[in-house]
Amino acid sequence: MNSAITSREHPDPSQKGDGVLTYDDGHGRKKDGHHRSPSNSDLAYGILDIPPWHLCIILGIQHFITALGGLVAVPLILAKGLCLQQDPLTQSYLISTMFFVSGICTLLQVFFGVRLPILQGGTFAFVAPSLATLSLPAWKCPEWTLNASQVNTSSPEFTEEWQKRIRELQGVIMAASCFQMLMGFSGLVGYLMRFIGPLTIAPTISLVALPLFDSAGNDAGAHWGIAAMTIFLIVLFSQYLKHIPVPVPLYGRQKKCHTSSVHLFQLFPVLLALCISWLLCFVLTETNTLPSAPTAYGYLARTDTKGDVLSQAPWFRFPYPGQWGLPTISLAGVFGFIAGVIASMVESVGDYYACARLVGAPPPPRHAINRGIGIEGLGCLLAGAWGTGNGTTSYSENVGALGITKVGSRMVIVASGCVLLLMGVFGKIGAAFATIPAPVIGGMFIVMFGIITAVGISNLQHVDMNSSRNLFVFGFSIFCGLAIPNWVNKNSDRLQTGILQLDQVIQVLLTTGMFVGGFLAFLLDNTIPGSLEERGFLAWNQAQGSEETTRVLEIYGLPCGMGTECCTSSCTQFLPFWPSREPGGKGEMGVSQLTLCSQDSSGERPKGAIETRIPLHPHPNPECAGLPVQAWGPHPPEHPHILYTVAAEYAVGEDHDKHAVTWHSVPAAWPQAASFPWLQPCRLSWKPV
């Protein structure tokens, strides 16, 4: 029979007639017995959870180690162009500065940016324009700087030789960062998101990691035995042993000495694998099992290949803005770095969606994306001021680590940001981490980049992959994102227009796979005819709209109620990066989601859905305090046999914690009244868990 899910006909809503009743505790945990989505079903800690402080520190160190390869690699790559090949001490200063600025930018991003657990660090998108700028005739290194016997690293002549080069990089980075801040804080990035769907996001995220197979393979290939062991340990801990508890001795004021079972393998798979592999490399180095000749295979697996950095680094050094002098600027460099900024923004937007999916958060709204890109621009400005020789961006490696560790708490990334700050100040500690052997880093990268690639492809679940249109858009974009950069890297001399600045812009854009693939997917998806359902926009928007105002604000709203309770005003509503209680409207407690669609007895979301939103208002009966919030709306009798998915929000307890109830029913079964069936919520007898 067709029956409305009302208290009149079903006093216990758990007795589901032809409808389907579920309720949500407001934190993404379904209480109807159904499994949660794969992205957040087995998270050890969600994005809003706060692990114990000691766990936050350990997990934060794990994220630091995950990002260590990229953080250290960028300054070392730039060292050649800066004429610092023979000056490892200054290289360690650049590494410490990179740590320090990355810590500042990470904290800014978590607290005021996109507010997802994403670590910030140096970006390879800026390496190409940096090297292109330093390869100009005016900045080529003198021959004497390449000869160790002729270099006096403490001489004023040598100091000025490398500092004038990094000052040039500082100036162009700071200028290009203004463009990125404009794109973010003006809302242009958020505006473009209305044209970006799963078919654009999927190849963009996948191409963040796929082109890095060469870098990961080269590092792992330094000693495939060590790399294979690192991969084996990460897979063993994160996949096979993740549900096995380990008894850990603890001490508490009440229980004194006792043991507690902790899922160590699930929480620290990367850290445990790196420590074990690192220790093995140390033992093999001390016993001279690994070759000591720099040209021999396996030499890079030794732990003493960077011993000079550790011995020469000071115990304490505080980086500060302008430490290398007053920045300079050139027009040629600015154009090249703007191309790097565009590539970095495309990568970051993809990382935002990947991160949200891995930690079980709703897809980021436009205001959060705008803030995230704007804060990244601010981070590039700070990186230029401090003199890292590079900018900052979201670290894809750490996004991949979220999928392995199953810890999505942003407080862990806050701890990681603090660890980065400390590593930037205590030079010896940062230099010690820089001694992790290359094959260990390479093995970790192979696992991380594989996770990121899979996360990108998983966005296609919203798309009709039986459509030849969609198969073409995705396959063509992915292949071009790999083929075109590969050709340009090998044939850069074929793209000479006679204008150096234009050559740099073209080369940077065409050698960035995520930009090539993302741009082609964006262009084809928005020009080739296809329905919104076929392109995945209906399911995509449903996924975005299913987590309504309360949870979205809880995750992506600014701290301390900024933009909602404390700072809501007539002027802030026009700021594209400022959160509000939209779409519910000012002062409303939330929004109810109503889906109109053809009837489906399975209770699944049928095709051809039409969505609308209904404002929520407190129930007028004071006896109903703490029961579902009432949602008023007209009864649509002209569609008596269309299945409706009805959602209502309610508040519980003195703090009025927000929850939601949803069910499916048809108007023909409703009481003949100009109202929806939840207009008498006082008769609902169930309570949320």
Image: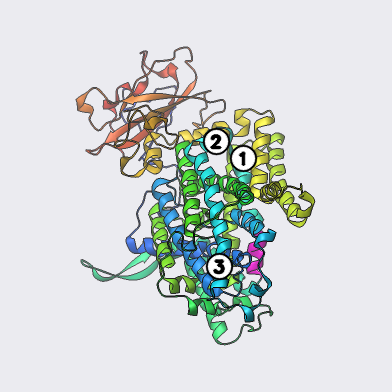
Q: Which amino acid is tagged 2?
A: Met
- Residue that mark 2 sits on: 193
Is 480 covered by the magenta stretch? no
Q: Earlier in the sequence, mark 2 or mark 3?
A: 3
Q: Earlier in the sequence, mark 1 or mark 3?
A: 3
- Residue that mark 1 sits on: 200
Dot 1: element: helix
Residue at the image point whose x is 64% and y is 37% from the top: 522
- Residue that mark 3 sits on: 160
**Are the two marked residues, 1 and 3, in contact with CB atoms closer than 8 angstroms?**
no
Is 218 covered by the magenta stretch? yes
Q: Which amino acid is tagged 1?
A: Thr
Dot 2: element: helix
State the count of labels. Answer: 3
Q: Nearer the viewer, residue 251 or 161?
A: 161
**Which label sits in the foreground, 1 or 2?**
2
